[in-house]
Amino acid sequence: MRTSDIERVKGLPLFTGVAPETFRIATAGAYLQRVPNGAMLLTEGDQVDFLYVLLDGTVELHGTWNDRETVLAILRPVSTFILAAVVLDATALMSARTLERCEVLMIPGDAIRTAMRLDTRFAVAVSRDLAGGYRGLVRNTKNLKLRNSTERLANFLLMQRAADNAGRVVRLHHEKRVLASLLGMTPENLSRSFAALQPHGVTVQGPMVTISNLAALERLAKPDPLIDNHAPRGGEIIADADAEVWLTERTRASAGSR
Amino acid sequence: MRTSDIERVKGLPLFTGVAPETFRIATAGAYLQRVPNGAMLLTEGDQVDFLYVLLDGTVELHGTWNDRETVLAILRPVSTFILAAVVLDATALMSARTLERCEVLMIPGDAIRTAMRLDTRFAVAVSRDLAGGYRGLVRNTKNLKLRNSTERLANFLLMQRAADNAGRVVRLHHEKRVLASLLGMTPENLSRSFAALQPHGVTVQGPMVTISNLAALERLAKPDPLIDNHAPRGGEIIADADAEVWLTERTRASAGSR
DNA sequence: GCCGCTTCTTGATCCTTATCAATGTCGGGT
DNA sequence: ACCCGACATTGATAAGGATCAAGAAGCGGC
């Protein structure tokens, strides 16, 4: 494990403000794994023995039932995942699959649980991280139950725009089929939803989405701070409590994950 | 606050194994509130200053957007709610409304956060509670995205049956319109879904649902331990890790809440 | 640069769910 | 016991979304 990687892990909300000694204990038995595209890191139902930290690449969390599958989250670096299962020493409720070549740090769950018992500040950091994840899922549930598919897409684009750089063009980092599943629709309907946004100033060319009329899109999307976590991208730690909220909630990407 | 109430709060997963001194600090400034039916305990967007503990009655958590409203959870005693917002000292993402006359214990958020910093065991307990809540929401999301409305109703009935007493008859504790919203459908479609279950051995008379053919219902519902949290009702603390999981996840009722 | 695969799009149709409207049923108040 | 209002059910219709079936476009491999 490179020292640059260690610094990146230390920068996670999960580890900020934690005693160096605790950090050492937690990461002592950790090892870095290079994983090819399309690999299953974890299958739902498996016992979870590690906390995963995505250092490079993209990971998809998904769930299955009765031959159906749905994407629950798409993760980009630096993110941790399946912390909840680690804390409870339980089996995974979601499967994790790489969407490209990835670098993943695997921290033994025992070490995490031990570090929590030894260092209150770490236990508090874990609580904050889980609370952020919890709130991300509440937002996601409201999004799913209160909006139709075109509204979800419109708000997704606005969130991506805010997270990326607030420019006129939003880049989709993943296949549209994956995005469709994340947003709770079929690929066919994602295409149609994009078409439905055209009168509102949205044009698509491959993975590039251009928002030519922000006001019109917002009029349709009606973004809501109690559902959508708009926030400029940035890695800095911010002391302010509310900023901390979106930082924690944001670390794990698009639609409320872990 | 009656001593019997104190005992009930102490019995919560959130406070088990916590030092008496910590419990005293956490609950020192708490006060018991009697709330009439239909009262709003909390509105989404409000700053959350208290952790709520439902001691008697029923509370509904819901979210709104653009004149639409959806029920996110129905809580029965003894349950805590909005722990995540308390931990982050953030604003509420859900509103809380009483569905009948209730007794609610309100614990100042400051006291909770202070207790977490002073007692690692409490911080760990909070983590476990939040992790359980997180996993409840993951289950709920899979339920919503992978199943149609009749399948969701069928599984809801199986879960209620397991939670209540495993008898042939399941009692619905709330209005059907509330249940419909919780399950992500309209009241009209809930009626039709009940009708669709009739060939599978389900009959309804008012709030009483009779399951005359469990095997047939299960064949349709295809319950899955990675979505549905089947468990016999019971308040005991169980040492086994997996049992602990559902205990924490279960405390806050029907469909994964807080 | 061309081929072939995968992904994306578009159209037609079907199924699921929502909406609107009307009737039926239950329970509380007087 | 009656009436009233809220809730639940049922039916008709419409809208949203899924599925099936072709085409079109992009991309990697050679």
Image (spheres, coloured by chain):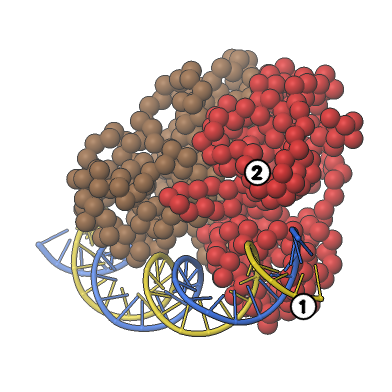
Chain colours: A red, B brown, C yellow, D blue
Instruction: Tell me which label, 1 or 2, sits earlier in the chain.
Output: 2
Viewer-nearest of discs 1 and 2: 2
Horizontal side of A145 relative to A158 (left or right) equals left
One can see residue B15 in this view? yes
**In which quadrant is the C terminus of chain A drawn?**
top right
Residue A213's disc is: 1
Q: Secondary structure at mark 2?
A: loop
Q: Position of residue B63 (x, y in %)?
A: 55, 55
State which quadrant residue C13 falls in.
bottom left
Horizontal side of A172 relative to A148 (left or right) equals right
Horizontal side of A247 relative to B77 (left or right) equals right
Residue pictured at 54% horizontal, 39% vertical: A44
**In which quadrant is the N terminus of chain A drawn?**
top right
The foreground one among A226 and A220 is A220
Q: CA distance from mark 1 to mark 2?
A: 39 Å
Q: Secondary structure at mark 1?
A: loop
How many marks the image carries: the answer is 2
Q: Position of residue A220 (x, y in %)?
A: 65, 74
Which residue is at the far top? B20
Q: Chain of mark 1?
A: A
Give, as a three-letter code, the residue at label 2.
Ala
Residue pictured at 71% horizontal, 71% vertical: A218
Q: Which residue is mark 2?
A: A39
Q: Is residue B231 above or below residue B169?
A: above
Residue pictured at 78% horizontal, 73% vertical: A210
The foreground one among A179 and A126 is A179
